[in-house]
Image (cartoon, rainbow, N blue to C red):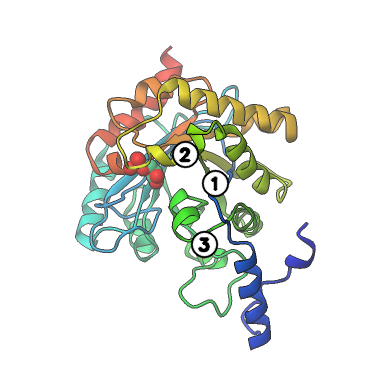
Amino acid sequence: MHGSTTNAYPTWRHNEQELHKVGEDVLSRMPRDCSSPAVEVPRWQYTLSFEKHLVTPKIVNTASLTPHDVKEVRSPGTTSKPQLQHIKRLNGTIEEVKKIVTTLNEAEVPSEDVVEVVVSPPYVFLSMVKSLLRNDFSIAAQNCWVRKGGAFTGEVSAEMLVNLGIPWVILGHSERRLLLNESNEIVGDKTAYALSQGLKVIACVGETFEQRESGSTLAVVAAQTKAIAERLSIWSNIVLAYEPVWAIGTGKVATPSQAQDVHSELRKWLHDNIGAEVAASTRIIYGGSVNGANCKELAAQPDVDGFLVGGASLKPEFIDIIKSATVKESA
Ligand SMILES: O=C[C@H](O)COP(=O)(O)O
């Protein structure tokens, strides 16, 4: 669907000319702003991100793993079970990661048919977490290469994640969009390729503070979503994560109304541009300063299907966040 760019990324064996072509292609698509989109999954999803103390999804810092995100997602009217994903950024040590996993393993949380929990540690901890984590929780990587693996030193391919038995990958997080210049198109390409290899994707979208202030929030998330949607034909393995950049790690959580408004518009966009079934079945989770105190009210919003949690996932309150998946059921 990308025409000339479809085969622009060589595989293992390529020559210098091919590499140069890839580099030019990537650079030519680097964004000058930060508008981007996201994806889908079953109803409820919780993503725990150990940003500074834990181990999972995102690669953030190296020294300390902090539980960065716990997300709960529930999509209205879907048969799919909740999904909880635990994401950790680039922080942490082996000891810290083990401690977090132990806490998760000992936690009493709703059953798998109520909430799906996904833990996302940095690459280097994926195998360890996979071997230690309870079987009813899943694992996600925090990123993967845009195309088939090859001579791209330092990158990790979707094929490698599949080979490791990692079922999920988070793509398009605002930190990668903003700090590493990942454009909407690159995020869309990454999503399509990861899905083609059998990975399930949590695709992140969200506006900056300036974009919200200028009234372009919906246009930004729609453009981000469109760049993903136009590269997909099947939506069963995608979860969309709405993460307003201004709320990530700031303590300034979106109000339930703000979150619901954007989630509702994203679902409407899916309905109008993809179809009613995809709109109803795609989980749209919220991320950005979710904690034990605000999770229930957010989870009660009709179009909030789970959370992508960062900082709070390092604390005991992340269990409360997971449990908020039951809020709608008891309403
Ligand atoms: O990956 C996690 C999200 O970016 C949210 O992070 P946060 O819960 O620390 O704001």
Q: Which of marks 3 and 1 is nearer the N terminus?
A: 3
Q: Earlier in the sequence, mark 2 or mark 3?
A: 3
Mark 1: few/some/many CA within 10 Å (<14, 14-19, 20+) = many
Task: Choose top left, top right, bottom left or bottom right for residue 226.
Answer: top right
State which quarter of the image contains the C terminus. top left
Q: Which amino acid does label 3 sit on?
A: Cys
Residue position for label 3: 144
Q: Which amino acid does label 2 sit on?
A: Glu
Residue position for label 2: 210
Secondary structure at numbered mark 2: helix
Secondary structure at numbered mark 3: loop
Query: x and y percent of residue 168 in the render?
Result: 50, 52
* Between 207 and 186, the one nearer to me in the picture: 207
Mark 3: few/some/many CA within 10 Å (<14, 14-19, 20+) = many
- Label 3 – label 1 distance at C-alpha: 12 Å
Task: Choose top left, top right, bottom left or bottom right for residue 279.
Answer: top right
Q: Residue at x 52, y 66 (%)?
A: 163
Q: Residue at x 41, y 27 (%)?
A: 325
* 83 sits left or right of 318 in the view: right
Residue position for label 1: 203
Query: x and y percent of residue 300 in the render?
Result: 43, 19
- Residue 242 seen in the figure: no
